[in-house]
Amino acid sequence: MEDATVEEAEVSGGAEFAPALVAAHPLGYSVAVAVGPELRVFNLKAGSAVPLSDDSGGCSHSDAIRAISFSANGVLFASAGDDKLVKVWKTDSWCCIRTITSEKRVSAVAISNDGLYVTFADKFGVVWLVSMGETGGGQEPTDNKPVSILGHYCSIITSMKFSPDGRFIATADRDFKIRITLFPKKPLRGANEIQSFCLGHTDFVSCIAFTCLSEGPSYLLSGGGDSTVRLWDYINGCLLDTCQVRDKVGEILEPNETEDRNLAVADICATNDGSLVAVAIQSLNGVLLLACDLIAKKLSFLKVIAMEKCYIPTSLSSSFSADLLWTIMGASNMPNQATSQLFTRLKVIPHFKNDLLASADHVPSVLEDSEVPHGEKLLLALQGSLDIAKQEEVLASVLAALKVSMHKMLVKKQYSEERREQRKRGRNDKKIKK
Amino acid sequence: MKRGDGASGGGGGAGGQQKGAGKLPRKRFYRARAHSNPLSDSHFPVPISPDEVDLSQHYPRYFPSDEGEGRQGDAAASRIRFADVGCGFGGLLVGLSTLFPDTLMIGMELRDKVTEYVKERILALRASNPGQYDNISVVRTNSMKYIPNYFRKAQLSKMFFLFPDPHFKEKNHRRRVISMQLLDEYAYVMEVGGIIYTITDVEELGEWMRSCLEKHPLFEAIPEEEIKADPVVKLLSTATEEGQKVARNGGQTFQAIFRRIPLQEE
């Protein structure tokens, strides 16, 4: 059934949809939303939408943004995507300070914890690095072009993160691999020393996130197409625990709904004390909460925060200081849409921290539109419209677009046995003996 | 996704004709295309992690399957130490088997018919030489994609890349089995002090492999006299079918033999 949908979409113009993304500033100063080629930023301190400016002399994004990321201290922000541009922004002025051109489309982007390097992964599975400093820091003289530092052999990288201590860079791919690489002091020469591989997912890995106890060791969380969230000792590549979300979601959705539905994990987000993990799942209208016990090294199902029927979040983010969990749903190039305006739908879950949400009798709530910080002003800036919630058909079409886009982004094309045979028959390099 | 032995597709039928006879399989039943695209998505089972590699299937004498699961997880149990990547018809494995009779080694080959041939060849050798050739096996896989699925960190002491596909076109250089990126993975599965052997009869590829290894911070060249003293080196050009072909035609070969070293960060 999935296949049919995808192929249909290919036939009808082959437009690529990209799911909308949300990222919260680590210190809670601002929140950024990417939908299609548009980057929308709202300053939470000033309570106003931020106009973006560009000092880099490069173009602005012209195609879907696929990855956005704040640096650990929140000073820098990077956006990249299908237009092969990687743009680096200073978050005090929201001015673009660098535009880097990639040879291939970009699937993931990250900023090193010291803010000195930006890394991005392209469609060949190669990770490139550019120095943000004035010089190469005593390394070989560079013309400040991106250098390739590592690669996943012909597998697209879906997520890339730096460890909290900045020593490692983690990359996850569309096969089932998570690679942990030592991030060297002079990374322009390449990141060749692999610390470990975290192997256990049986399908694509869609998202990874580091989590740690305060001042304690850090761990890695991952989610994937096998409907599991996994907890890793990434230093040794050991799987500590696996949480099957398929069963839990199956209980919540109606039985006939789970059958042909994709229950892949779309995104994960941990609280800053590492005790809770929010999980977005394809086809689930809501957010799943897991309790994460980093002492016992256990992941366990806690509860589901249900949302309205046609709201299926695909991207989650929270900041270290504020306890808000931002969730978003939206897609670029929505079909059957009259206006050129790109809509998203944003929802915020308050008190995203342990003490309240973890208690069994607490029924978590989702903020009403009027309760969202800065209310309508913020929603207008980030969603593109206020009454999107009322436009059922818009949301429905977003939903349809998302289904295709997530599938295309994460799932490798599978050809049936017959189709493979057919392709072989049509091969022109084969001698035909009769 | 455990490795199933009943590799689907051709080859199996031809192999069946000779089973039990202890006779060496004949190559003409295993004709295969000379090249295989390492970029294409493959349709054979791959172990999810090295823990799932079923050693009892490969080395029944070392890992009797009736001893149950306990043995597999035993860290002290002998593990595969040599890997021949792109083993072809298995000449090197057969040569190494008697040279290192107590070392487990595996050949990795992408073409299924060739893999079937090597399987039959090893079974025939075991049948006609009891007590020998129990330490070698072969697996059909794409080692450019799945090396970490088969081996743990620092597990291997030797890796072999003999007469790999040259992939002349620049566009296809990323299909070469030796590249800076893939060397990261080979370095990961090799122990410090382990040796990587490469040989080719294509000068351009020889230079490429040498320059990749020279540039890579986790490998260093092995001095000439040490190479001369290594009994394995002689096998590189004499044990394999490709090597013999080159020697027959009076061709030249180009070797690059490097040692895995720890990372040095100034």
Image (cartoon, rainbow, N blue to C red):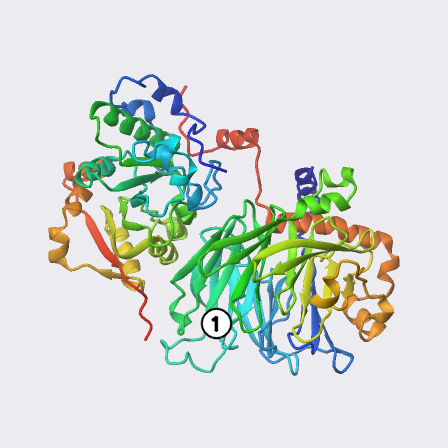
Helix, strand or loop for disc 1: strand
Locate residue A210 relative to residue B61 in the image: left or right: right
Residue A329 percent location from the top left of the image = 74, 58
Q: Is residue B20 left or right of residue A162?
A: left
Residue A36 seen anywhere in this rendered image of the structure: no
Q: Position of residue A103 (x, y in %)?
A: 50, 61
Q: Is residue A376 above or below residue A391?
A: below
Q: Residue at x 45, y 28 (%)?
A: B8
The one nearer the camera, A388 or B50, is B50
Indicate left or right for B172 with A211 as reference: left
What residue is disc 1 on? A130
Q: In front here: B84 or B149?
A: B149
Q: Name which quarter of the figure residue A182 lies in.
A: bottom left
Q: Chain of mark 1?
A: A
User: Does B170 appear above or below A413?
Assistant: below
Q: Nearer the viewer, residue A55 or A153?
A: A153
Q: Is residue A274 left or right of residue B191?
A: right
Q: Quadrant of residue A318?
A: bottom right
User: How many marks are shown on the rendered structure?
Assistant: 1
Q: Amino acid at mark 1?
A: Val
Residue B189: image x %, image y %? 35, 52
Occupied quadrant, residue A77: bottom right
Residue A311 location, x and y as percent?
Answer: 79, 55
The answer to whether residue B257 is above or below residue A213 is: above
Q: Residues within 10 Å of mark 1 (few under 14, many from 20)?
A: many
Q: Residue at x 26, y 36 (%)?
A: B135
Picture residue at 69% right of the left edge, 37% below the top: A1
- Image quarter where the C terminus of chain A lies is top left
Can residue A216 be seen from the camera position used here? Answer: yes
